[in-house]
Each structure stands twice: as structure tokens, then as C-alpha cells.
Image (spheres, coloured by chain):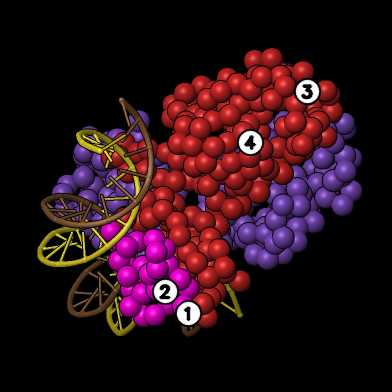
Chain colours: A purple, B red, C yellow, D brown
DNA sequence: ACAATAATGTGAGATATCTCATATTTTATA
DNA sequence: TATAAAATATGAGATATCTCACATTATTGT
């Protein structure tokens, strides 16, 4: 983690204006941080000091269970807030957030502006929208997780995350996201290859039968 | 569903003051509705006209999947808001909410006060707290669902929902809540009886070995 | 009070998914 | 560049959970 100098800060502030999200001048309270790839933004069970607004990058929100299993709750993609739950005091201890790529974040000191933020209708409205959208996405994901076998969910995930006709995600992340074991993910991927829906190439998979994948995925959503 | 008369309304308004949740006078916009047991407050895929604040009763928030499976997302207990996601415009169509007991709700016409509500810092702050708490509860539930077998989750559920040493919930609801089949729930309950943790009595179960149940439940949470 | 509906209960077989062990390859790091 | 760490890969056996079929007992509506 590196705090950017004032000169480095400037272009980001200009390129990503967030003043519209507040009814007071937020700029004096903003610092810009850069997180390396793989670095932790929040450690599990910590008390965050900052509300972050990620403007560039990608991260994983996860929780480690007592039995050692890890649930990847969500892929966090910019632009988004992080630490808003903690700001609201709703959470005793934070979940973990680890970057997947180098990430740039605005950091707003909770100590300094908590009072102001929690009385700001512009910000609060934005936060409400953000929270409800997040809740709905998660509800959809998790209810589907328990209502459909991996076959359907994986097909859906491949279609969503593939670039053109090429799928190439880290199995280690995907299995945690879809809530299955690494072994089982590989098993179903192998099945897809056997059936000819996918074909291994380089270090990824080519979608060789998009139609069937779409049919499998379509069994989930209306 | 029955709209209460003005005289009937009065005692509820007095007993459950919610004016503190708003920075303007909400009373002119409040109507009081009574829902019968088993009645639907929101049908799935409808567009709610009211923001509800349930003051008495209990309901189920659920979603029906394309394959016919039902996920009981949450047990909704008073006091709580309902329809807040729709108010925020975040949801195209609503989930279903069905009462479990006769329920009394304050109804606030979205059409009439949406603008005011979405600019009210007092209400918005409350809503943020509510939403983030809900998100966290759900995240906890769903990540645990996929990280632990029913044995642990059921033990935890029994301890939470039993009255003194007696457990008596509808299996049909519980299996949807815990995300398993009816058959499997009964199977694990039978197992608990065989092991002597529970004993069938009347139409419920007596907790005959609370200690073991607590041990099973404790494997989940920190 | 009776019929319809919902809830409970059980068996048997299928399968989706997990655990663990182990080998190889790729990527990160000193 | 050597070494450690992470990611990929696969087999074999176990199990958690599901589906379906069917019978019984409550509960509800008329």
C-alpha cells in the first residue's frame, strides 16, 4: 500500500469526480492509495479506519470459516465503495478484501467525516442504492447456488466472464465464488470438454458450443 | 388484507411511534393494514405501491426458481421495513412476501412520498443501517450454508428457534430456509433422535442433549 | 362434518459434491 | 537462476443431499 503524493493524486481526483456524491466538499478529506496486486485492503476481523472508493482495480471479498473453508462472497470491481458497512457501525469486524489487480482507491478517514456522511442525504441515498443492489445480487447468487447444480451455474458464469469465445479464469477463485470444491469444478469443466461445449487451448478454454451453454444457463434465470 | 378504520388505526400509531424515523411529519401518509395469516403482502414479480413497516407479525421472504424450487430467503419479523428495495428503484420486480401470522403494517404510499423519503437524511440513515445489517445476516447464512453440512446448521437453528427445551417448527419452512430438501431435513432430524440429541414428543422435539447440539453449532461461528 | 389441501413420515436408489492423496506445471521470489 | 509457492490436474472412494414414490396424519375451507 502506498499513499500517493499530492501531484500524483491530482489527475485521479480530476478523472474520477466524486464530489457529486456528497452535499459538502469532500476533496479536503480525500487521500489516494495504491494497493499492489494481491495486497489486503481489509484484513479479516479488523476495524477499518477508512471508507474506500475504488476507482481502478478489482478485488475479492471473502470470509474464512472456522473449518478452514473460504467463501468468496463477491468480486469487487471499480467503481465501488468498500468499508461502508463498517462506517455504518453495523459490523463488529470486517470481512477480508484482497486485491486481484493493482488498485487505486480514494480513502476517506472515517474518524474525520463519519458524522458528516451519516447526515448527508446525497451520500446516504447513494449508499442505500448501492447496498440494496448489492443485497439483491448476492441473494440471487446464493439462492441460485442452492437451487441449481454446478453445471448450470458454471455455464452461466462462463458466458458472463468469457472474453469473446475464450474463457480463462483462475479455477482457485472460481470454485470459491461458485461455492464448490476445486475438484468438483475441474470435474464439471472436464465434462464440458468431453461433451464438446468447451475445448482446452493455451491455458484456457474455447467456447465450442455456445448454444448448449446458453441453454444450460437459461435454466436458471427468467 | 384489510385497511383499518381511523379509530382502529389510532392505538397502533400511538403504540408504535415511527415519527422519529423521519425528519418530516409522516403521520398524514400512514395507513394501517391488517394481513391475514398466509396472505401475500407482495406477490412475486409485482410492483409494490407501498412501503410497509410491519409492527406486528411474522412473514416469509422467498423466491421461486425456474425449476420450481423455493428459497426462503429470510424470516421477516416485526418491526421491520418491507418494500424498501423497490422504493429505491433497485429492483425491477419484487420478491414474494407471505405472512406466517396475522400481521399489522403501516403502509406508506410510495407515489406520495418517494421524493421526500429519498431526500430525508434521518430516514436514509436508518435505511442504510437496516440494509447493511440485512446484507450481513444473509451473507453469514448463505456462506455457512455452503461451508457446513446440515448437521451443524440444523443444530444451530434448533438452538436459536427452540423455546426452552422444545423445538417445534414447520419442516416445510425450515428445509426451504436451510436450503435442503424436505427429505434430507427429516433424515438428519431422525439421526439426531437416534443419537439421543432430540426426542420426539407431541408434534415437536425435546432437546435431550443440548450440550452436543451446542458443540455442533459451535463448529460454525467464532 | 366432509372433502380438499397441507404437512408429516419413510424407503430406495441416484447423483452432485467432497475429501484426500499425489504429480505436474506455472508463477513468484530470494 | 534456483527454490519456494501457487495453480493445475487427475484418481478413487466417501458422503451429503436429492428425487421420486407412496402412506399417514393434520388442518382448512365449505
Q: Is residue A210 left or right of residue B93?
A: left
Q: Is residue A139 magenta?
A: no
Residue located beneath label 3 in the image: B27
Q: Earlier in the sequence, mark 3 or mark 4?
A: 3
For the record, the magenta segment spans B183-209
Cβ–Cβ under 8 Å for marks 1 and 2: yes
Q: Vertical placement of A34 versus B215: above or below? A: above
Q: Are marks 3 and 4 on the same chain?
A: yes
Q: Secondary structure at mark 1?
A: loop
Residue located beneath label 1 in the image: B209
Q: Vertical placement of B75 versus A43: above or below? A: above
Identify the residue shown where x is 17% and y is 47%. Answer: A196
Identify the residue shown where x is 70% and y is 49%. Answer: A85
Tell me residue A154's x, y (percent).
33, 48
Closest to the observer, B120 or D9: B120
Q: Secondary structure at mark 3?
A: helix
Residue located beneath label 4 in the image: B54
Judge whether residue A175 can be spotted in this image.
no
Q: Earlier in the sequence, mark 1 or mark 4?
A: 4
Label 1, label 3: how far apart the Cα atoms are: 50 Å
Label 1 packing within 10 angstroms: few (<14), some (14-19), many (20+):
some
Q: Is residue D29 left or right of residue C11?
A: right
Q: Is residue B112 left or right of residue A27?
A: left
Closest to the observer, A194 or C23: A194
Q: Any mark on residue B198, and which? A: 2
Q: Is residue B184 magenta?
A: yes
Identify the residue shown where x is 31% and y is 36%. Answer: B66
Amino acid at each position: 500500500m502506498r499513499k500517493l503524493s499530492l501531484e500524483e493524486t491530482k489527475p485521479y481526483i480530476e478523472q474520477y469526480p466524486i464530489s457529486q456524491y456528497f452535499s459538502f466538499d469532500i476533496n479536503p478529506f480525500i487521500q489516494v492509495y495504491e494497493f499492489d496486486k494481491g495486497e489486503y485492503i481489509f484484513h479479516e476481523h479488523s476495524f477499518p479506519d477508512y471508507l474506500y472508493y475504488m476507482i481502478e482495480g478489482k478485488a475479492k471479498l471473502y470470509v474464512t470459516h472456522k473449518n478452514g473453508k473460504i467463501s468468496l462472497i463477491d468480486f469487487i470491481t471499480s467503481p465501488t465503495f468498500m468499508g461502508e458497512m463498517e462506517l455504518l457501525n453495523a459490523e463488529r469486524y470486517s470481512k477480508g478484501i484482497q486485491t486481484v489487480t493493482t488498485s487505486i482507491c480514494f480513502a476517506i478517514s472515517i474518524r474525520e467525516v463519519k458524522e458528516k456522511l451519516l447526515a448527508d442525504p446525497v451520500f446516504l441515498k447513494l449508499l442505500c442504492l448501492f447496498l440494496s443492489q448489492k443485497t439483491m445480487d448476492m441473494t440471487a447468487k446464493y439462492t441460485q447456488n442452492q437451487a441449481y447444480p454446478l453445471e448450470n451455474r458454471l455455464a452461466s458464469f462462463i458466458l458472463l466472464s468469457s472474453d469473446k469465445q475464450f474463457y480463462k479464469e483462475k479455477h482457485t477463485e472460481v470454485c470459491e465464488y461458485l461455492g464448490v470444491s476445486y475438484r468438483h469444478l475441474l470435474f464439471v469443466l472436464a465434462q464440458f470438454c468431453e461433451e464438446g461445449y468447451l475445448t482446452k487451448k493455451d491455458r484456457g478454454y474455447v467456447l465450442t458450443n455456445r448454444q448448449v451453454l446458453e441453454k444450460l444457463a437459461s435454466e436458471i434465470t427468467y
